[in-house]
Image: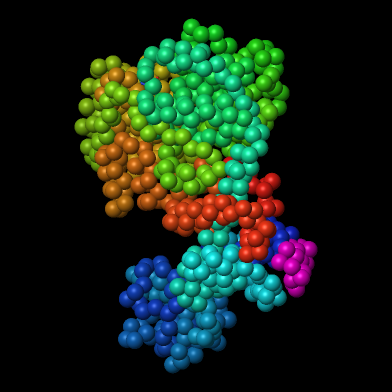
C-alpha cells in the first residue's frame, strides 16, 4: 500500500467513478487526501444578534409548532415550523424536503443549518443537524462538478484517511517543524478537511502553506542553480564600441534606471548562461529603448532578435520607433503580423531563414510553425502578461536557447516580484524620464459630467484629442457594446459637427479597430470613445484628456494603464475619473488614483484592497498559482520559505541528509515538469 496508489483501490470507486474524479485532478490516494476544501461552512451555533443577513449559520432552539407541509406546483413543497431561541421566535422553512417533517418534534430541541434572512427574521433551512456531538462544526466545501457530489466526496476522503492515514509521512526536517512550531503533516492534512476549532484550521493551513511555498522555492532555486552551473545558453559577444556609438546617438540621455537595467541585460547577453529576465517599468518609463539597445547588441554579435507584442497596432508602433532609433545605422528590420500579405510574408520568411533580417517585430504571427530563424539570439516579449505561457515558449524554441527578456508595465511590487518570480531575474525601471509633466487626475461624480464636457471643449479647441473610456460590463458583451454606443451617441450629440467622434469596441473586427485607431492617430478623429481595447501601449502624444466612465469598475492597475495613454507629449494632460462608488473601498480607490502617479504604489495598494487573483487576472500574469497559499495574504510565509529554501541549498548535498529525504523526494522528480513560467 502506498499513497501513490490509484484511487481505484478505495472501495466504491470503480472505473466510472475514477474517471469522474480524474476530471477534478484526483488520480491517486494522495491527490484525494490533499484535495482541500476551498472554504468551510461555519456550522457552530450562533445567537441571532450575531448574524449577518444571508449568512449561513446553525441555529438551535425549541420547536414551538408542528411542521406544516404545503404543496404547490409540480412536486414542489414547502415545510414550515417555528422555533424559539431565548425569547425570539424564528420562522424556519425547507423547500422540497417534505420528508423532514418527522424529524421536527414539538417542544424538543432542534438545530438547523441554513441561510439567515434578517429582514423576515427567518431561516431558510438547508439541513437538520442530527445531534450536537456531531463534531462537525465546520463543514468543508469542495470544488466539485456535476458528476462528483460534495457528500460523496467527503465520504470518500474519510475512507481514504481511514485506510491510508498511517502511511502519511513527515517530509519537513525536524528542525523546521520545531523552529516554526508546525503541525505534523498527517495532522495538518486531516485538519485541512475536518478542523474542529478555528485555531486548528488556522494551524493546519499555516503548515500546508509553508510546505507548499518551501517546495516551490526549493524547486526554482534548484533550477536557477542548475542554469547557472550549466552555462547552456548563448554567449552573445556584442560589439561594445558599436553599442556605445548607438546609445550616444539616441535623441535623449538614458535615465539612471535605464542605464542600470541595460547593463544588467547586456551582462546576461554576454554570459553563456541562459538569460530569463523580467523587465518591469511603469507606463512611459522607457522600456522600448532598452529593448532596442538589447536587440541592437544582439545583432552586432551576428545573431537575430525578435520582439513580440500582443496587438497589430503596437507592432506597427514599435516598428516605427525602432526604425527611428536605428536610423541611420544599418539594421535590417521587418514587421510580421496577421495582416502581412502572402507574398511579402513569403519573402520575409525566406530572409529570416537566411539571416538577411536582423530584427523582426511582430504579433502572434511570429510563432507560426513555418517561421524559421537563421540564428535567433534574443527574444523579447512586450506586455508579457498579455501572452499565454505557451505562446512565449513557442517563440523561444525557435532558437537554440535564445536569451529571453519579458517586459511588463503591470507593476508588481518589488518584494513580491522577487519572491514570486523566484527563478527569473528581475530588472526594474523605477524612474521616469526627466521633464515629464505629471498627469493631473481628478475624480468627479456623474452629475458634474456636463461641467467637465464644457471644459473638454476648451482642450479640443486647442487642437488636443480626447479618449473616453466606457466601463466594462462583465455580464455581457452585448451590453458592453450597447453601453459604449450610447456614450458614443451622447458625445456625438455634444461635440459634433465641431469635432469628429470615433467608436472602438471589442466586437469589432481587428482590421476595423486598426483603421479607427489609425484615424485617431492621424487626428481625423478628435474624440475616441472606447471600451478597454485600447489599454495596451498605444501612443498618441496629441491626446491630453483621458475621461473614464464608471471608473470604480476598474482595478487600480488598469486605471493606471489607461491613464498612461495620455501625458505622452509636451502638453499638460488630465485624467478624469467619473464614479459614484458604492462603498468606502471604492472611495478609497478613487482617492488614491488622484494622489499618486506611481504604478508601484498603486499596485501595492490594489493588492492590499483586492488580492492578487483580481489584480493580476490569475492566469495571464505568469505568477505561479498556489493551491492553498496566497502570495499576498501569506506573503510572510512565502518570504520565510524563500529564506529557508536558500539555506537548505547552502548545505552541501542536502538531498542525501537523512532528515531531508522527504523534501528531496518531493523536489527531485518534478524537475523536468517544473515549468512555472514558460
Ligand atoms: P514604456 O515603458 O511605457 O514602453 P516607452 O518606451 O514607450 O515607454 O517610452 C515612452 C516615451 O518616453 C517615448 O516617447 C520615449 O521616446 C521616451 N523616452 C524613453 N526614454 C527616455 C529618456 N531617457 N529621456 C527622455 N525620453 C525618453
Ligand atoms: Mg511599451
Q: Which residues are magenta?
A: 1-18
- Tell me: residue 415, above or below residue 659: above
Q: How many marks?
A: 0
Q: x, y (%) of residue 324?
A: 46, 12
Give 103 or 56, whichever is nearer the viewer. 56
Q: x, y (%) of residue 131?
A: 52, 86
- Tell me: residue 328, above or below residue 675: above
Q: How is the image coloured?
A: rainbow
Q: Is residue 148 left or right of residue 138?
A: right
As drawn, the residue found furthest toward the front would be 652
Q: Residue drawn at (27%, 39%), measured in percent from left and top?
A: 594
- Tell me: residue 572, above or below residue 412: above
- The image quadrant that residue 92 belongs to is bottom left
Q: Is residue 12 magenta?
A: yes
Q: x, y (%) of residue 542?
A: 34, 19
Q: x, y (%) of residue 452?
A: 23, 31
Q: Residue drawn at (68%, 53%), measured in percent from left and top?
A: 668
Q: Is residue 329 visible?
A: yes
Ligand 1, what quadrant?
top left
Q: Is residue 315 left or right of residue 219?
A: left
Q: Is residue 133 left or right of residue 570?
A: right
Q: Residue drawn at (40%, 67%), measured in percent from left and top?
A: 54
Q: Residue drawn at (61%, 33%), measured in percent from left and top?
A: 274
For the N terminus, give its image quadrant: bottom right
As drawn, the residue found furthest toward the top would be 328
As drawn, the residue found furthest toward the right would be 15
- The image quadrant that residue 636 belongs to is bottom left
Q: Is residue 94 magenta?
A: no
Amino acid at each position: 500500500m502506498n499513497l501513490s496508489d490509484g484511487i481505484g483501490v478505495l472501495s466504491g470507486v470503480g472505473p466510472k467513478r475514477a474517471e469522474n474524479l480524474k476530471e477534478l485532478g484526483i488520480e491517486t490516494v494522495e491527490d484525494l487526501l490533499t484535495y482541500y476544501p476551498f472554504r468551510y461552512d461555519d456550522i457552530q451555533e450562533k445567537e441571532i444578534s450575531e448574524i449577518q443577513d444571508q449568512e449561513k449559520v446553525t441555529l438551535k432552539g425549541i420547536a414551538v409548532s408542528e411542521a406544516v407541509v404545503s404543496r404547490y406546483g409540480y412536486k414542489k413543497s414547502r415545510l414550515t415550523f417555528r422555533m424559539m431561541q431565548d425569547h425570539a421566535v424564528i420562522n424556519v422553512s425547507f423547500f422540497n424536503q417534505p420528508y423532514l417533517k418527522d424529524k421536527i418534534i414539538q417542544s424538543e430541541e432542534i438545530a438547523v443549518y441554513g441561510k439567515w434572512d434578517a429582514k423576515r427574521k427567518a431561516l431558510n433551512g438547508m439541513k437538520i443537524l442530527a445531534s450536537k456531538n456531531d463534531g462537525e462544526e465546520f463543514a468543508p466545501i469542495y470544488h466539485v462538478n456535476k458528476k462528483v457530489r460534495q457528500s460523496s466526496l467527503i465520504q470518500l476522503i474519510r475512507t481514504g484517511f481511514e485506510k491510508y492515514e498511517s502511511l502519511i509521512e513527515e517530509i519537513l526536517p525536524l528542525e523546521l517543524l520545531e523552529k516554526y512550531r508546525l503541525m505534523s503533516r498527517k495532522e495538518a492534512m486531516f485538519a485541512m478537511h475536518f478542523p474542529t476549532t478555528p485555531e486548528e484550521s488556522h494551524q493546519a493551513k499555516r503548515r500546508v502553506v509553508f510546505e507548499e511555498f518551501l517546495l516551490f522555492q526549493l524547486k526554482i532555486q534548484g533550477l536557477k542553480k542548475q542554469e547557472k552551473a550549466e552555462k547552456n545558453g548563448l554567449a552573445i559577444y556584442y560589439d561594445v564600441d558599436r553599442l556605445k556609438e548607438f546609445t550616444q546617438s539616441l535623441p535623449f540621455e538614458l535615465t539612471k534606471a535605464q542605464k542600470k537595467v541595460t547593463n544588467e541585460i547586456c551582462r546576461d547577453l554576454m554570459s553563456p548562461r541562459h538569460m530569463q529576465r523580467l523587465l518591469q517599468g511603469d507606463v512611459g518609463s522607457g522600456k522600448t529603448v532598452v529593448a532596442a539597445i538589447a536587440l541592437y547588441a544582439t545583432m552586432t554579435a551576428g545573431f537575430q532578435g525578435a520582439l513580440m507584442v500582443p496587438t497589430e497596432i503596437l507592432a506597427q508602433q514599435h516598428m516605427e520607433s525602432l526604425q527611428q532609433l536605428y536610423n541611420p545605422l544599418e539594421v535590417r528590420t521587418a514587421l510580421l503580423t496577421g495582416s502581412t500579405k502572402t507574398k511579402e510574408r513569403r519573402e520575409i520568411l525566406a530572409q529570416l531563414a537566411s539571416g538577411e533580417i536582423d530584427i523582426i517585430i511582430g504579433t502572434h504571427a511570429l510563432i507560426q510553425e513555418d517561421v524559421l530563424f537563421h540564428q535567433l539570439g534574443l527574444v523579447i516579449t512586450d506586455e508579457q502578461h498579455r501572452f499565454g505561457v505557451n505562446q512565449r515558449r513557442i517563440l523561444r524554441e525557435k532558437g537554440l536557447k535564445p536569451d529571453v527578456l519579458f517586459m511588463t508595465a503591470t507593476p508588481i511590487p518589488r518584494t513580491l516580484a522577487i519572491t514570486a518570480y523566484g527563478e527569473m531575474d528581475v530588472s526594474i525601471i523605477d524612474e521616469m524620464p526627466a521633464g515629464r509633466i505629471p498627469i493631473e487626475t481628478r475624480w468627479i461624480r456623474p452629475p458634474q459630467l456636463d461641467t467637465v464636457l464644457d471644459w473638454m471643449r476648451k482642450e479640443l479647441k486647442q487642437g488636443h484629442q480626447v479618449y473616453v473610456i466606457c466601463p466594462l460590463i462583465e455580464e455581457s458583451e452585448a451590453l458592453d457594446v450597447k453601453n459604449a454606443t450610447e456614450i458614443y451617441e451622447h458625445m456625438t450629440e455634444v461635440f459634433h459637427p465641431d469635432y469628429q467622434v470615433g467608436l472602438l469596441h471589442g466586437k469589432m473586427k481587428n482590421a476595423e479597430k486598426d483603421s479607427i485607431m489609425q484615424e485617431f492617430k492621424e487626428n481625423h478623429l478628435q474624440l475616441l470613445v472606447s471600451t478597454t481595447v485600447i489599454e495596451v501601449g498605444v501612443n498618441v502624444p496629441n491626446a491630453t484628456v483621458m475621461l473614464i466612465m464608471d471608473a470604480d469598475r476598474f482595478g487600480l492597475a488598469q486605471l493606471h494603464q489607461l491613464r498612461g495613454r495620455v501625458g505622452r507629449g509636451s502638453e499638460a494632460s488630465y485624467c478624469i475619473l467619473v464614479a459614484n462608488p458604492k462603498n468606502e473601498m471604492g472611495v478609497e480607490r478613487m482617492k488614491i488614483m488622484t494622489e499618486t502617479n506611481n504604478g508601484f504604489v498603486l499596485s501595492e495598494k490594489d493588492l492590499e484592497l483586492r488580492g492578487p487573483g483580481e489584480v493580476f487576472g490569475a492566469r495571464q500574469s505568469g505568477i505561479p498559482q498556489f493551491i492553498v497559499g496566497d502570495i499576498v495574504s501569506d506573503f510572510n510565509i512565502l518570504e520565510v520559505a524563500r529564506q529557508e529554501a536558500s539555506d537548505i541549498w547552502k548545505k552541501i548535498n542536502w538531498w542525501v541528509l537523512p532528515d531531508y529525504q522527504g523534501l528531496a523526494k518531493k523536489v527531485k522528480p518534478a524537475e523536468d515538469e517544473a515549468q512555472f513560467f514558460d
